[in-house]
Structure formats: structure tokens, C-alpha cells
Image (spheres, grey):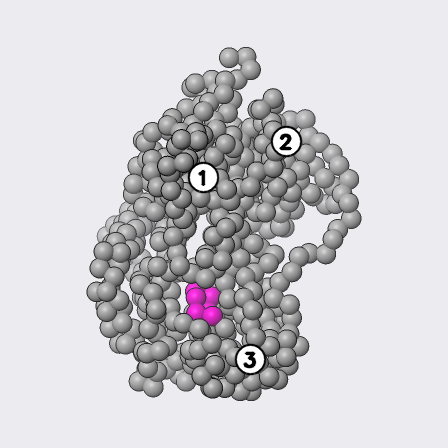
Amino acid sequence: MPKPCGGSSPSAPEPSSSSSSSVLDFAIIGAGISGINFAYRIQSTLPLASYAILEGRDSIGGTWDLFRYPGVRSDSDLYTLGFVWRPWLEGCAIAEGDTILKYMRQAVREKGIDRHVRMGHKVLKARWTDKSQQWTLDVESNGELKHIHSRFLIFGTGYYDYKNPLCPPIPDLEQFTGEVVHPQFWPEDLNYAGKHVVVIGSGATAVTLLPNLAQKAGHVTMLQRSPSYIISADNKTELRLLRRFIPLLWIYQLLRWRQMAIMFLLVQFCDLFPNFAKRQLRTATEKVLPAHVPYDPHFKPRYKPWEQRLCVSPNGDFFDALRSRKASVSTGHIQGIKDRAIILESGEQIEDVDVIITATGLRMMFAGDIEVSVNGKTVNLAEKFLWKGCMFQDMPNACLVVGYTNASWTLGADATAILFCRLVQQMQRLGSASARPHLDAKQQSVMKSVPVIDLSSTYVQKARDSIPKAGDRGVWKPKYNFLSNYWDARWGDIMTGLRFSPKANS
């Protein structure tokens, strides 16, 4: 019988309360890639600063610890998705989740970051007061409510809801007599061997699942409303050959900059010449499609390249699964479901379905659904503009770590960490206790709101009203370009748009 797509956790007993008198310099929320990388930047540029990473779950890793579905992997290369301070030296650019998680754990141990991680610390509220010039965090841990104080607050919380996935309505799903699974909550005991599995969706998760499920399933059908662009990419790096002639760290830097250049040029090419890019992508796809699978309608997207992220098929595994005939693609809208049959509006029926996997996307969420207040007033983060893509308007000493959607997430997260640590160094020189992004009424009246994340994907569009805003000018513009953002983080203006408050004894 169908399982619910998602839901809130059962209510817990009211926690007891305790408070810590010590004040941290930095409280980092989240021990995923964003939080771990920020911790490294703090300890390398501000070695005397104290910090703690508050992780609500019982393990580090974020996405790579949460998702457990078959074949879960990155959709970006690890030369840029990995940490620049802990080079990725494996023989593949795209790696599976358990390999990435192992890499992250090694990185935090090697740099001593693990000593600063507090597991099972879920932040519920964050309260700033000008009087104290610090944040007070209400943190639940082992049934106890703790109060943790810090001068700076870092939201390394990622961009989606860990507990509730995006669940668009699927007509008559409750009438399905098989099993319904969402990839975000993959059951360890799911037995799909020899069964007919239908994956609903066309994004990166669906493209990853299809070839991996096909290895055991009787047949896998990817059912999509509309197709995505899927690129077949070679996933081998001849490190052994290269290291005969070039030092390993040089190889890493060459591969990293090569990948950044490729992504930059690809995005620019698609943006400047969308129709030509569309034709090139079609030609590349038709070359790897098996003869019995038509390009139209299954691989002919309705949108221009990079209006949504391109999906990657490492070594063409997706197309190999289609070629084996153990997997197929159906395109159309679901009219209804009856027993074990999915009926499309076109009249087509997908019959004898045993398992439905709803790879329908993530529910976007920034700042981890934490209740935030400044001087006793609750802050609606979605109403705020972001200064340089990382600091909320009118919110002191707080940084939201946002990565890129048109390149590896970590590139943007690292540029943010470098920028904010540099700002803290500047505050130390000025003798400032806090820095607060500010827009006066005149500036705000003429500034237009633009998307922080500029994608047309369904999960992004559904979350528009809950995402912080960017502006169309100056320090309020969003960050879309790593090279310019990195230069700005290192050497750009960090005074415009900020108001600084002196320390009490200054």
C-alpha cells in the first residue's frame, strides 16, 4: 500500500532547559559541505576564533548522509564540488554518495574540524539583540533545551527541507496497490528485484535511479511529464598516466580549473546561443540513443538549455540501460491510477507496476526552518534582500551560505565563506561589534527583485515565495559567476551597504 510522501516528525516531550555562559565567536548550523568548508575558512583565516558546528542529525555529511537510494551520486564533478583545501584525487570526476561521505569524513578528521562538531544539536530559534550584540540560539539536544551564544551566525543549512520532500499531487495515488517510495526516505528493506518499477520524474534523481534500479529490477520505466536534457559524459580520469609526468597536486589544480572553464563556457554558450546549443545537445543525444527509442517526445525539452540544470549520465549509463531494454521512458500526464496500472491522459497505460518511486523533487528551504528574530521582532527571511548573496538585509552578523546552480555548489559556498571571513577581519580592524546590511526606503523603492536561484525547475518555481530576494543593482545582485564572485570575495568592496556598530568599550 502507498506510503505517505513525507510528513512532520511526531511531537516530542517538552525539553528541559539549560544555558551556557560562554560565548562562541561563530555558530555554524549544519555539518554538510557548506558548514564544513566554512569551518575550515574560519580556522585558517581567523585562528584565534572559537566556533562550533551544530548538526541536528547524528552524522556529518548533509545530503550525502541523508540520501541512500541506489546509485546516489553527485551531478557535479568532485574537482569543484569537493573542498579546494582537500584535493579530490580519485580516478573519477563524478562519485557515488558513500565515496563522497568517506571523503568528507577524512577531510574533517585531517583538519581537526571534527572536534568542533556537536551532533544531535537541532537549532530551533535564533535571537539577536543589539544590547548584547550577539545571537542566542535555542538548541534541542537529547531532550534538553540549550541556549548557545555566539557573535556570528552561519546558516550552512543547504537549500531543501530534510523532513518533507516536494510532493506534487499524483491523481489516484492512494488507489495504487503496490509500494510507493520517495528517494529522500529510501527504505533499507525495499525489495525490487525482478519487479516492475516506475520512477516518476525527469530530474537528476530519476536519471540516476533508472540505470541503477535496472540492474536488479525486472523492468524500470521513467515516467515524465516533460523531458530534461541528459548529457553522456566520460567519468574516467587517467591519473596514473598523468602522475608519471606531473605532480599530483598540479594535476588536481589543472583538472579543477579545466572543469570550471568547461562549466563557465558551457553556461555562457547556452545563454548566448540557446537555439544552437539546443541543436548540439540534440545531436549528441541522438548519437547515444538506441534505435528503438525516439528523441521526440522523450528527449526533447520544452525549455532552453540551462533554464534548468543539465542532467549528467556518467559513461552513458542511462542510455546503456535503455539499450538493454530493461528500462524505458514514457512521456505524458497521469490521468489516474487503478490497482497496479498507471493511466496517462494520452490513453497509454503502464501496467503491472509493483513499485512507484516519486522522484518529484525537493522542497526548497533556506535557513533550516529556524525561527529568527532581531530585537524581539520575528524576521520573515523571504522578504529580505541578500547583501552580496549571503547577508540578510537588516540582520546583523549572520551569513547564509548559498552555492551555485549553474556550477558546483561548493564554488559558491566557498566564495561566501572567504568573503564573510574577510568582513570579520575588517570588523576587527574597525573595532566593530556588528555589521548590518541596510537598504533605505528610497533605495528599496527603485530596486527590482530578481531570483537568487534562476532556474525554471518546478521545485524552484513552487518555492519562489519562500526564498530570500536579490536585487538588480550594486551589492544586492545575485551571484551567478564564480570568477567574478571569487575576485569580489578576495579583493572587492566590503563596506558599501553595511552599517557597523562599535564595540561597547570602543
- Residue 385 is labelled as 1
Amino acid type at image mark 2: Gly
- x and y, in percent, of residue 267 in the image: 29, 55
Image label count: 3
Crowding at dot 2, Cα within 10 Å, few <14 / some 14-19 / many 20+, comes out as: few
Q: Are marks 1 and 3 in contact (CB under 8 Å)?
A: no
Residue 132 seen in render: yes
Quadrant of residue 447 within the rendered picture:
top left
Q: Residue at x 66, y 57 (%)?
A: 8
Who comes first in sequence, dot 1 or dot 2? 2
Locate the N terminus by quadrant: bottom right
Mark 3 sits on what residue? 336
- Residue 252 is labelled as none
Amino acid type at image mark 3: Gly
* CA gap, disc 3 and disc 2: 49 Å
- Residue 376 is labelled as 2
Amino acid type at image mark 1: Phe
19 or 275, nearer to the observer = 275
Q: Is residue 195 above or below residue 126?
A: below
Quadrant of residue 151 within the rendered picture:
top right
As for residue 205 lying within the magenta part, the answer is yes
Q: In the structure shown, which secondary structural element does the residue marked by tag 1 occupy?
A: loop
| Range of magenta residues | 201-206
Name the residue furthest top: 505
Crowding at dot 3, Cα within 10 Å, few <14 / some 14-19 / many 20+, comes out as: some
Residue 115 seen in render: no
